[in-house]
């Protein structure tokens, strides 16, 4: 089986794989510090390095929760469309963020290129701000009696 390229669109598991992903997520969660092995069709075994185990667990955990995943090497240069896809925004909006200096980029000729780690840093900051704003709105709603916790 050929490996997919890392420039692929995000991967969302089909519905018929959901139960298997949930079971695999549970197995990885309970594996602890045990040694995991991959077994090839010919029976050859290879021990899974701890770092690979952690990446695999994160991917399976997200996919078991019906989230799409993309694996991108840190430092990889992305096109504006790839970065927009990762951030789940339109390409014109991403270009606005770049032009405002909110995400660093370089130009190759007339094309903008963005480092994947800069995109991830922006996403983490954006998501943290959103979470804080939601927390404050919820707190305000509870204080005014307009929010009821179920």
Image (cartoon, helix red, strand yellow):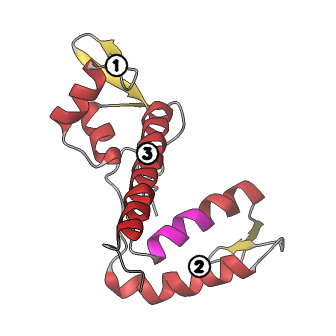
Q: Nearer the viewer, residue 79 or 41?
A: 79
The spot of residue 14 in percent (x, y) is: 33, 78
| Residue ID for mark 1 | 101
| Residue occupying the far left of the picture | 92
Q: Is residue 61 magenta?
A: yes
The answer to whether the residues at label 3 and label 2 have Cβ atoms under 8 Å apart is no
| Residue ID for mark 3 | 129
- Give the image quarter of residue 38: bottom right
Q: CA distance from mark 3 to mark 1?
A: 18 Å
The magenta segment is: 57-64
- Who's the residue at 67% across and 61% down the image? 54
Badge 3 or badge 2: first in the primary sequence: 2
Q: Is residue 65 magenta?
A: no
Q: Is residue 4 visible?
A: no
| Residue ID for mark 2 | 25
Badge 2 or badge 1: first in the primary sequence: 2
Q: Nearer the viewer, residue 96 or 14?
A: 96
Q: Secondary structure at mark 1?
A: loop
- What quarter of the picture does the C terminus occupy? bottom left
């Amino acid at each position: 089986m050929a490996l997919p390229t890392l420039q692929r669109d995000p991967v969302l598991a089909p519905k018929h794989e959901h139960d298997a992903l949930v079971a695999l997520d549970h197995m990885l969660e309970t594996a602890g510090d045990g040694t995991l092995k991959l077994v090839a069709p010919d029976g050859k075994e290879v021990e899974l390095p701890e770092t690979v185990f952690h990446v695999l667990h994160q991917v399976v955990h997200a996919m078991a929760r019906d989230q799409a995943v993309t694996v991108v090497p840190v430092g990889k240069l992305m096109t504006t469309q790839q970065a927009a896809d990762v951030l789940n925004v339109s390409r014109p909006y991403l270009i606005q963020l770049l032009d405002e200096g909110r995400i660093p980029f370089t130009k190759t000729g007339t094309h903008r290129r963005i480092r994947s780690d800069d995109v991830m840093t922006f996403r983490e900051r954006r998501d943290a701000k959103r979470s804080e704003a939601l927390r404050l709105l919820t707190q305000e709603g509870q204080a005014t009696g307009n929010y009821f916790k179920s």
